[in-house]
Amino acid sequence: MNAFEPDLAASIPFRDREACRRVRGLRREELTRHANPDFKIGVIDEAPTFYGAFAADLLAEIVRARDEGRRFVAILPVGPVPQFRILAGVINRLRLSCRHVVTFNMDEYADETGRTAPPTWEGSFQRAMGENFFGLIDEALRPRPENVHFPTDRNIADYHKLMEDAGGVDCCYGGIGWCGHIAFWESHLGLEFAGDLPAFKRAHGRIVELHPMTIMQNALHSFGGDWSWVPPRAATIGPREILMARRRSFWLDGALGGGVSWQRFIARLVAHGPVHPCVPGSILQETVCDYTLLGNVADDVQITMA
């Protein structure tokens, strides 16, 4: 018998240790089964195929809207990045006009006062999207400048209204953070709703304090491991904007190299744990959503010693 059963660290908002134990034990072959048939969990083993499928999903939505003579309105994440480069190349080769495309980025970094980063700052999401997507599309084919939106300290309170004014969101694309966040809607924000899930789902974008797990996650994948470089706050969409979309498409590729993935546990908790405000991504379980894991993320959770 193992008598060593430590509690969760005090900084972790989600406290259901039994739920954590249960989802930790889910094997790879069990992951794709879910009670909601509209919440479709898939696994793609090879990274080139994974990013190609992500790009193909966006491309199909853009082409469908064009053929139907309507706008395509999308919520976009900044990462992962490879699919945007793939998509930009295909758009240019096909000479596919994206003048009907309207985008709303999920989030943007902010300083300790809540002032959002300008595109001139090297870590800003607006700059990253310009360098890795919009700027790679031939100028004549790009979305109109007035149709490309980023959350700021000036517009975040009304960001959801801008989406409504655009005719609503066709698809919300995204990923899942280490603490279970969607966009930068962090796990600790769930504490203020005291178990009131309907109120949580109605919450819209705001300036938030980043959770320590998010600071560390982003330091690892974007800032060369330098946690002192990661801003402390962000402007982010909320659950309301994610749920208002007609469809959701989430892609989880969280790998650190050497066969290690930081996303294996949280991918399981979001998809198979309780729907809970302190695991923000868990609200996807009750929606129409494609939830695709890179093969390394789907692998079993286990303790390994280097």
Image: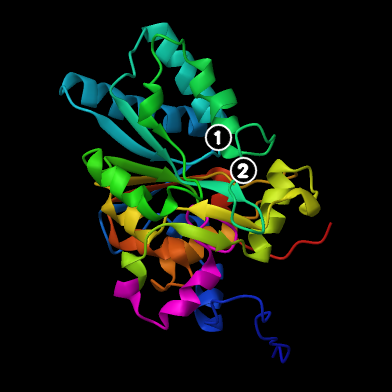
Residue 303 in view in this figure: yes
- Label 2–label 1 contact, CB within 8 A: yes
Residue 40 in view in this figure: no
Q: Secondary structure at mark 1?
A: helix
Q: Residue 271's x, y, as percent?
A: 42, 61
Q: CA distance from mark 2 to mark 1?
A: 9 Å
Q: Give yes or no for residue 195 being in the magenta stretch.
A: yes
Answer with left or right where residue 248 lies relative to residue 112.
Answer: left
Q: Residue 131's x, y, as percent?
A: 59, 24
Mark 2 crowdedness (10 Å alpha carbons): few <14, some 14-19, many ≥20 = many
Q: Which residue is mark 2?
A: 117
First-in-chain label (2 vs 1)? 2
Q: Is residue 5 above or below residue 65?
A: below
Q: Which mark is residue 126?
A: 1
Q: Look at the image and tell me in which quarter the N terminus lies.
A: bottom right
Nearest the eye: 23 or 14: 14
How many marks the image carries: the answer is 2
Answer with left or right where residue 258 lies relative to residue 54.
Answer: right
Magenta highlight range: 177-199
